[in-house]
Amino acid sequence: MLKFKINIPLAQLSLPFLFWIPKFHKIPSKQRFIAASYCCSTKTVSSILTKVLKLIYESHKVYCNRIRAYTGYNCMWIIQNSLEIHEVLNTCQSKAKNLKTYDFSTLYTSIPHDKLKEKVSNLVIKSFDAQDWKFICVKNDRVSWCNIEKKNNISLSCDDVVFLLHWLIDNTYVTVGNKIFKQCIGIPMGTDCAPYLANLFLYAYEFDFMNKLIKDKNWLILRKFSKCFRYIDDLLTINNDNFMEKWKTKIYPQELSLTCEDKTDQEVNFLDLHLEIKKNIFSYRLFDKRDNFKFPIVNFPNLSGNIPTSQSYNVFTA
């Protein structure tokens, strides 16, 4: 069990404050709420969970690669960048039929806590059960599986990881002005482990869906979903023949809204790629979404603004 106890009175909490970033490129314009959690009391726990959940993700990635090697079907739709899409497009150049992109419009703010804790906890338990290890050891930026508790390391058992996960989700508070709010639905964008929580939450549903199709030997539907890619809340389907539209409510929980704003299924933008089908062949090139904005973009910050000076200079050096 944990050798440290988390019991911080609310009055002593250093809470993240909430602010919003306008999304002027959306029509109509929208706002994205961010929780600035750099100095809050949950920072340490969230930072530890980020490293742990990354290891959990990698273990499930290995497991899905084994399933893919035996069956030919991909149960892990998560990608880290667009390079994985290049490889798939190069293997099916003569079979290009259609492309579709989808977006979870309110992913972070709509995830129900009970389902989040259940799904991610199950993934943690499965990872520990599949490994011949008793602990996950965390030291600085290094994280690894281990059988004994190491000195100068944070050694977490399966129960410890689940406890930290539930504690963080149950103790999410934000400040707006002089008011304090407890987040009862969703997770705040800004806490360290939020991307991994969202990613693994969606993966749990995607894996259950694909795994059931494999067990039921539903090869027709499996083929339609064999080329799906998701980067957090952005989803791309290749040669899906619009089956995602029919099956999305059976894959994902009802609290999440998956929408498609594509004008055609022959030309889409996904991440940093512009994808197009020409004469049944995939064509792609680099894409910068700022090129489609209806207003001019100022690439370099003005030092008289509110951006920290160090970050402004980093833009120039980069």
Image (cartoon, rainbow, N blue to C red):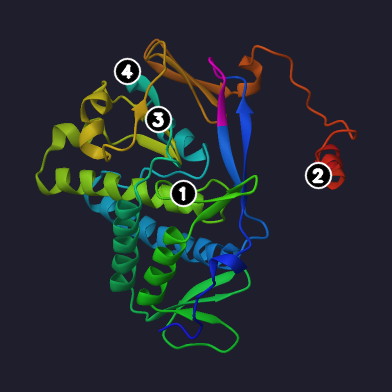
Q: Secondary structure at mark 4?
A: loop
What is the quadrant of residue 176 in the picture?
top right
Q: Is residue 191 above or below residue 95?
A: below
Q: Amino acid at mark 4?
A: Lys
**From where the camera sits, is residue 64 visible?**
no
- Answer few, some or many: residues within 10 Å of disc 2's Cα (few below 14, many 20 plus, some between 14 and 19): few
Q: Is residue 179 left or right of 203 when viewed as pictured?
A: right
Q: Which residue is mark 4?
A: 97
Q: Amino acid at mark 3?
A: Leu
- Answer few, some or many: residues within 10 Å of disc 4's Cα (few below 14, many 20 plus, some between 14 and 19): some
Please say if the residues under marks 4 and 3 sit with CB atoms less than 8 Å apart.
no
Q: Is residue 87 above or below residue 198?
A: above
Residue at 25% across, 45% down:
72
In magenta, the rendered stretch is 26-31
Q: Which residue is mark 1?
A: 187
Q: Which one is in front in this view, the residue at disc 1 or the one at disc 4?
A: 1
Q: Position of residue 219 (x, y in %)?
A: 14, 37
Q: Which residue is mark 2?
A: 311
Looking at marks 2 and 3 on the same chain, the residue that comes earlier in the sequence is marked by 3
Towards the viewer: 139 or 303: 303
Residue at 10% across, 43% down:
217
Q: Quadrant of the N terminus?
A: bottom left
**Furthest-right residue in view?**
304
Q: Quadrant of the C terminus?
A: top right
CA distance for labels 2 and 1: 26 Å
Towards the viewer: 116 or 252: 116
Q: Secondary structure at mark 1?
A: loop
Towards the viewer: 271 or 33: 33
Please say if the residues under marks 1 and 4 sit with CB atoms less than 8 Å apart.
no
Q: Position of residue 310 (x, y in %)?
A: 85, 47
Q: Secondary structure at mark 2?
A: helix
Q: Main secondary structure of the magenta part?
A: loop
